[in-house]
Amino acid sequence: MLPVSTIIIDHTLSRIVLLKEAVESVLNSTQLPEEIIIVLDLNKQDFEVYKNELNDLLSSYRANIKIFQNQHQSGPAGARNYGISLAKNDWIAFLDSDDLWHPKKLEFQWKFLQKRPFLVATHTKELWLKNNKIVPTPKKLESGTGKFFVEAIRRCLISMSSVIIKKSIILTLQGFDEKLKAAEDYDFWIRFLIHYPIALTPNIDNQIPTIKRSGGWKQTSQTRNLDVYRLYSLLKIYHKFYDLLSDFERYHLIHQIRLKKQIVLEQRKKYQFSKEIEEIFKEIESDLNHFG
């Protein structure tokens, strides 16, 4: 077994079948992680239903698997933070409940890291499936390697389900921002890329290691007014990390803040924000006057 803790999260009772398939893709790995932590962001009643379903599946596998309820129901950020707090290993691999791993993904990625001890994180490319049909990945969303902060503030370029990262680095960066009910991955990775590079693990025998699925089920990335969360994250970078950025990075950060400001203000004219989105907007509204 590899000294890795795999954290799998889910947030809705309607995705039991997807979660089972995600867990099985880990259990069918050529080398298993030392522990699998499943965090369910559900109420008590739904948690018990899920747990019973999973126990039937997991009873046939010899693996260290633990299932937890995230009682605060604080979204993907809170579920991931809770899983991280429970993890015994200093290397964390994430998997969302609607995604899958290639059987050799974990082993191949671990060997890649062992040959590069200077790295604190690595990710992989994704194969996109929509309703079980392959969707070409747009060129602007292709995975990269290095310290690509400027590219990352334009759009999220790192898939959580593809990552292995040191737990100590996540804690140094204070984990995922639980104010964000979506785009918490975007927020985390732009903070990460200020300080560290990330490497892209090659494909496995010409096969992409991580499979990203979408279909008729709800995804947090489809949250309406997602740009309010992104604008909040960019302003946080501006206030807390501006001095760490190069002139080139500062220019593009301010440019993106101005772009997102216009998008958000136009959205607010067209329709009413949800309560959570409105709270985030009110928090950053006074800041927007500084950006023409």
Image (cartoon, rainbow, N blue to C red):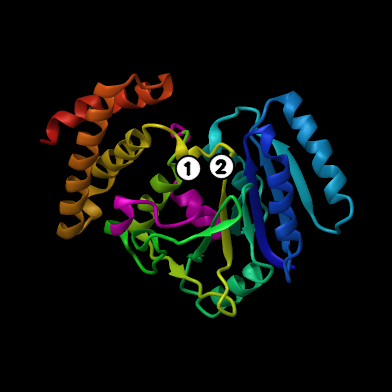
* Magenta-colored stretch includes residue 170: yes
On the question of residue 233 being in view, the answer is yes
| Residue at (40% x, 63% y) in the render | 142
Q: Residue at x 39, y 69 (%)?
A: 145
Q: Is residue 70 above or below residue 241?
A: above
Q: Residue at x 74, y 31 (%)?
A: 47
* Stretch of the chain drawn in magenta: 151-180
Nearer to us in this view, 280 or 246: 280
On the rendered image, what quadrant is the N terminus found in?
A: bottom right
Label 1 residue SS = loop
Q: Position of residue 79 (x, y in %)?
A: 59, 39
- Residue situated in front as seen by the camera: 255 or 166: 255
Give percent across and percent down for residue 282.
Answer: 30, 22
Question: In the rendered structure, which amino acid carries the disc numbered 1?
Answer: Phe
Residue situated furthest right in the rendering? 60
Q: Measuring from the top left, give residue 112's x and y in whole percent.
A: 55, 76
Compared across the picture, whether 1 is left or right of 257 comes to: right
Is residue 165 visible in the rendered image? The answer is no
Q: For the residue labelled by badge 2, is the local secondary structure a helix, a strand or a loop? A: helix
Which amino acid is tagged 2? Asn
Whether the residues at callouts 2 and 1 have beta carbons within 8 Å, the answer is: yes
Residue 178 magenta-drawn?
A: yes
Residue highlighted by disc 1: 176
Give left or right: position of 121 versus 229.
Answer: right
- Crowding near pointer 2: few (<14 within 10 Å), some, many (20+)? many
Q: Residues within 10 Å of mark 1 (few under 14, many from 20)?
A: many
Residue receiving disc 2: 81
